[in-house]
Image: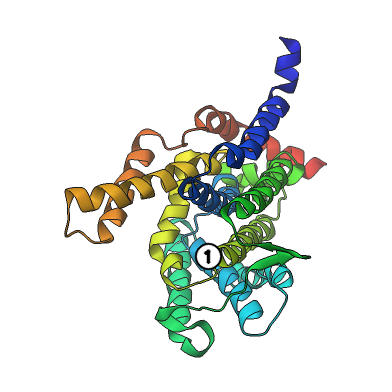
Amino acid sequence: MNYWAKNKNIILVLLVVTLFALFPLVVKSSYFLGIFVIAGLYSIVAVGLGLLLGYAGQVSFGQAAFYGLGAYTAAILSGTYGWPPLLALAAAPFLPAVVAAVIGRPILRLREHYLVLGTLGFGILVYILLKEFVGLTGGPSGYTGIPYLSIGGLVLNTDVQFFYLVWFFAFLTLVGAWNLVNSRIGRALRAIHGSEVAAEAAGIDTARLKLKVFILSAFLAGLAGGLYAFYITFVSPSPFGFHASIQFVLMAVVGGAATVWGPVVGAFVIVGLIEFLRWAVPVVLPKAGGEFEIIFFGIILVLVLLFRPEGILSHKRRRRLEPEAGKEAAETCST
């Protein structure tokens, strides 16, 4: 009993990693492997958004823009400028991170719905730029000519290969997030979420800390975007619009933004719903367009906020965090 209690998290993580490692050996369907690859990409974005939303308390509807900037960076560097694909993938997260550093300080001064509108406006701006810079991005028709990702002499062009690659980065992201939230910085972030005024009064530089998390979330979104570009070998503005930003927020909220694993659970839930709607909407409403998916996700968001505001995994944790915010802020400053 004591052994299980002490090592429960390690055992569960090892079990999950083993199941994921065995999955492609058992499931041969390209369809299901593709779903898991997309869920892995979304998990990387959602974990970064979870750090920003669930721990720092900052809502962003602009993550799809960072996701798109990473994808186009990888695509253009490798397709137009002839960079080695692996080097282009390594460069993909940095443009979103730099953009986040530039816009983060003014935009994070906004509060509540003004912050939502600010990030939403940024997302729309990037989406329009991706469509208008036809000579660079291919415009609405998209960008083609992205080479396959290769590592040494190994060319990655199958679902199985990308399954392992994407989930390798996803688990690295989870490990990094776990260490971050259980560090002194993580305690400071929880203090900011609990009461930003109290955190500032305790001496925490809330503006700098929020900016760092904002940049980190953009970096992770850019990484996922770069992987997406090499997985699909085609990018267009459509997957990086307002619709995608709503989905990313839903993933974090539904799974539980204030937990490390919650956004991953949310990513699987939302990807499953997307696939279900893709099948069910044409059957029930043959003439319906994609806007019905937005309506459906909007309803889900409202219901979750009404009946499960802390998400699937974080019900008990949030209740514990809020009363401890002031204590953790003081603890952070005293160390």
Name the amino acid type tagged 1.
Answer: Ile
Q: Count all numbered tags in the image, as a single digit.
A: 1
Residue at far top of view: 1
What x and y, as percent, mark residue 291? 27, 60
On-image quarter of the C terminus: top right
Residue at x 69% of width, y 41% of height: 178
Is 60 on the left or on the right of 230, as rendered? left
**Is 312 on the left or on the right of 17, as rendered?**
left
Q: Quadrant of residue 72?
A: bottom right
Quarter of the N terminus within the rendering:
top right
Please tell me how crowded label 1 is: few (under 14), some (14-19), or many (20+) other residues with Cα within 10 Å.
few
Q: Residue at x 46, y 49 (%)?
A: 31
Q: Nearer the viewer, residue 315 or 240?
A: 240
Q: Closest to the observer: 83 or 328?
A: 83
Name the residue rendered at 55%, 69% in the picture: 233
Image quadrant assignment for residue 14: top right
Residue 327: % across, % down: 68, 34
Residue nearer the viewer, 166 or 216: 166
Extreme-bottom residue of the structure: 135
Q: Taking 15 as reference, is 306 above or below it? A: below
Please say whether residue 57 is visible from this viewpoint: no
Comparing 141 with 201, the one in front is 141
**Eyeballing the image, is 174 above or below 144?**
above
User: What residue does disc 1 label?
Assistant: 232
The image shows residue 158 at horizontal and vertical percentages of 59, 57
Please indicate, yes or no, whether residue 247 appears anywhere in the rendered image: yes
| Residue at the spot 32% in from the left edge and 40% down from the top edge | 303
SS for callout 1: helix
Instruction: Answer above or below: position of 187 versus 111.
Output: above
